[in-house]
């Protein structure tokens, strides 16, 4: 096996699901496992989350749902966005909960359900202000009536997505929930209130009890990463991923010598340089070396130096005693030190979601 690997702690996944389940009860927990479980491995994460008490799973693509079904995972699987019309037949065949927000999609699901001779359960997505996807609030009742008019369809859920739930105190979250509640009231008055209402992502689940409704769609929090730095201390989450490699070469480099492509880093003293066989093709952004990023070697922070290459990076270990085969931790804990995905995200001016999702497919995942 390659020395570089991502170790995924399924016990941490289970812990996080248990914490969230206790926090949002009596609402059910839907573990979001799109993007191959945010880079952690969708199948392994799904099984761990369901065993820990998650009731639902959610994905972005029909193909992602099919992978779960072919892995004999039979829990309810929600599609978070309306699929292409050409993909709806497969979604119905594999018993995925299809998200809809256009009349064309409703008709396509109904036709597919008739062909498959099954009842298709759909979730109507309402755009309450994020302006990405979803039916407009004023058109939601008409679309719900269209769904109800098909004997092959069941309106199982109505949901929305909140744009600023990870910004505590932002008034627009309540605005969106007010709009959602108004839609639900219309449906209720028309006898069309569904079994499940849901609006909560991880941030909403943690910070906005009002938005928990019947189901919480927990994504990044399942993986032990807070949805925003400001929410880091709200609940006891345990990061599930550790990105490791090992030293592949050690050499002494003299003062005045440069290193890596462009020789952009020049040493001001003699030092020990360790080469590590991991690079930007694995999801370690080329920019990290210029932004003052450390890795852990021998329980100590050591800076990445020189340009990160496709397959390798270099680390300044000073005068430490370093040997080929020594463990290098890029994300995770080693001894008393820790480098987090949030730390990378802060340096890269992005979010930790992108960091973990970006760990490439050629990095083996190992589960414990």
Image (cartoon, rainbow, N blue to C red):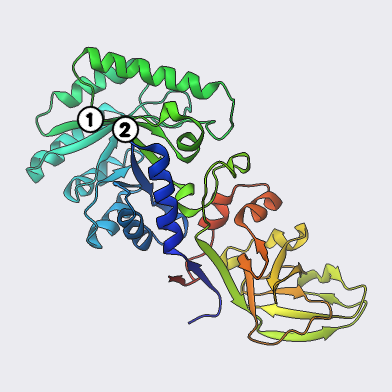
When asked about the image quadrant of residue 169, the answer is top right
30 or 349: nearer the eye?
A: 30
**SS of the residue at dot 2?**
loop
Identify whether 324 is placed above or below 214.
below
When asked about the image quadrant of residue 286, the answer is bottom right
14 or 142: nearer the eye?
A: 14
Residue 220 appears anywhere in the view: yes
Residue 92 x, y percent position in the rendering: 19, 45
Tell me if label 1 and label 2 are in contact, CB under 8 Å.
yes
Mark 1 surroundings within 10 Å by alpha-carbon count, few (fewer than 14), some (14 through 19), many (20 or more): few
**SS of the residue at dot 1?**
loop
Which residue is labeled 2 in the image? 214
Which residue is labeled 1 in the image? 195
How far apart are labels 1 and 2 at the CA level? 8 Å
Identify whether 102 is placed above or below 33.
above
Q: Which residue is located at x 51 percent, y 31 percent?
A: 163
Q: Which residue is located at x 41 percent, y 26 percent?
A: 127
When asked about the image quadrant of residue 47, the answer is bottom left
């Amino acid at each position: 096996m390659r020395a570089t690997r991502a170790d995924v702690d399924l016990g941490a996944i289970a812990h996080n699901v248990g914490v969230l389940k206790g926090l949002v009860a009596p609402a059910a927990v839907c573990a979001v496992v799109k993007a191959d479980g945010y880079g952690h491995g969708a199948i392994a994460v799904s099984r761990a989350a369901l065993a820990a008490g998650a009731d639902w799973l959610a994905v972005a693509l029909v193909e992602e749902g099919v992978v779960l079904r072919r892995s004999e995972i039979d829990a309810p699987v929600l599609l978070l966005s309306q699929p292409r019309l050409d993909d709806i037949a497969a979604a119905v065949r594999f018993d995925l909960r299809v998200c809809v927000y256009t009349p064309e999609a409703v008709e396509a699901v109904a036709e597919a359900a008739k062909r498959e001779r099954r009842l298709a359960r759909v979730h109507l997505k309402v755009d309450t202000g994020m302006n990405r996807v979803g039916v407009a609030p004023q058109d939601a009742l008409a679309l719900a009536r269209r769904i109800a008019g098909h004997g092959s369809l069941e309106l199982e859920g109505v949901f929305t997505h909140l744009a600023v739930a990870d910004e505590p105190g932002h008034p627009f979250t309540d605005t969106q929930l007010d709009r959602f509640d108004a839609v639900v009231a219309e449906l209720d008055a028309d006898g069309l209130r569904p079994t499940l209402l849901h609006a909560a992502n991880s941030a909403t689940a943690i910070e906005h009890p009002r938005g928990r409704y019947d189901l919480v769609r927990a994504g990044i929090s399942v993986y032990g990463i807070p949805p925003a730095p400001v929410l880091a201390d709200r609940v006891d989450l345990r990061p599930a991923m550790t990105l490791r490699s090992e030293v592949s070469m050690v050499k002494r480099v003299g003062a005045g010598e440069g290193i890596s492509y462009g020789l952009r880093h020049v040493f001001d003293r003699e030092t020990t340089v360790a080469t590590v066989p991991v690079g930007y093709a694995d999801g370690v952004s080329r920019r990290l070396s210029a932004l003052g990023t450390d890795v852990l070697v021998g329980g100590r922070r050591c800076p990445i130096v020189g340009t990160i290459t496709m397959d390798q990076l270099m680390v300044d270990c000073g005068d430490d005693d370093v040997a080929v085969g020594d463990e290098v931790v890029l994300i995770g804990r080693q001894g008393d030190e820790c480098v987090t995905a949030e730390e990378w995200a802060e340096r890269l001016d992005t979010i930790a979601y992108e960091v973990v999702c970006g760990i490439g497919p050629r990095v083996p995942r190992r589960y414990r």
